[in-house]
Amino acid sequence: MRIKTIRLNHTIVAAHDKDTAAKFLIEILDLPAPSLIGPFAVVRLNDDTSLDYIDTEGEVTSQHYAFLVTEIEFDEIFERIRERHLSYWADPGRHERDQINTWDDGRGLYFDDPNGHLLEIITRPYGSGGKTASRPHPLVQPTLEPKGT
């Protein structure tokens, strides 16, 4: 099977106030100002990918958005999170408050945006440390032994 060149281009993010939500993200992640395209406040993450915020009435269903960042970017983003006195957790279940995780021998944390979306910054992709990492990602399963061994 050949490797595909498919890349995510954009996704639409529901918000009570698209401008406030977009501004929050660009300030935390230190991104360029959003552009307004039709009903969207478009936040460019890189040359290929954007989060397109749109105003919605009623309840906003919480989504999870994970951002892969460098170690230096992690430190800078983490500092901005602390400067704003935002709550953050080492886990998506929000049990380990004011902690970061070291899964896959990297660092990661979760925090909420103004609409209740769960944002995550990680320095290593899930499972990239495999089972030999000092702290394997909790989703990495041990290898199953064949039956009869």
Image (spheres, grey):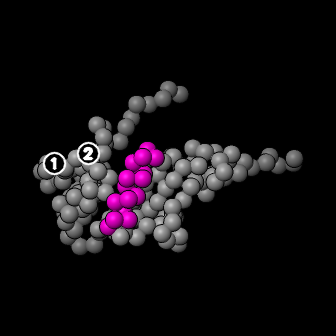
Q: How far separated are the C-alphas under marks 2 and 1?
A: 9 Å
Mark seen at residue 60: none
How packed mark 2 is, by other alpha carbons closer than 10 Å (few <14, some 14-19, many 20 or more), is some
Q: Nearer the viewer, residue 122 or 58?
A: 122
Judged from this view, the residue extending furthest toward the top is 2
Q: Which mark is residue 44?
A: 2
Q: Residue at x 14, y 55 (%)?
A: 39
User: Where does the magenta region start and end?
Assistant: 70-84
Residue type at numbered disc 2:
Arg
- 98 displayed left or right of 36: right
Q: Which residue is mark 1?
A: 35
Q: Are marks 2 and 1 in contact (CB under 8 Å)?
A: yes
Relative vertical location of residue 8 with respect to residue 54 in this rendering, above or below: above
Badge 1: residue crowd in 10 Å (few <14, some 14–19, many ≥20): few
Left or right: 65 as drawn, with respect to 47:
right
Q: Residue drawn at (66%, 51%), measured in percent from left and top?
A: 134
Q: Quick check: can you spot residue 149?
A: yes
The image quadrant that residue 112 belongs to is: bottom left
Relative placement, left or right, of 96 versus 77 is right
User: Quadrant of residue 85 in the image?
Assistant: bottom left
Residue 31 lies within the magenta run: no
Residue 11 vertical placement versus 2 (above, below): below
Q: In the rendered structure, which amino acid carries the disc numbered 1?
A: Ser
Residue lying at 63% horizontally and 45% vertically, measured from the top left: 130
Residue at 39 percent of width and 35 percent of height: 6
Q: Looking at the picture, how far across and down is residue 105, in whole percent?
A: 59, 49
Of residues 38 and 73, the one nearer the viewer is 73
Quick one: SS at disc 1?
A: strand
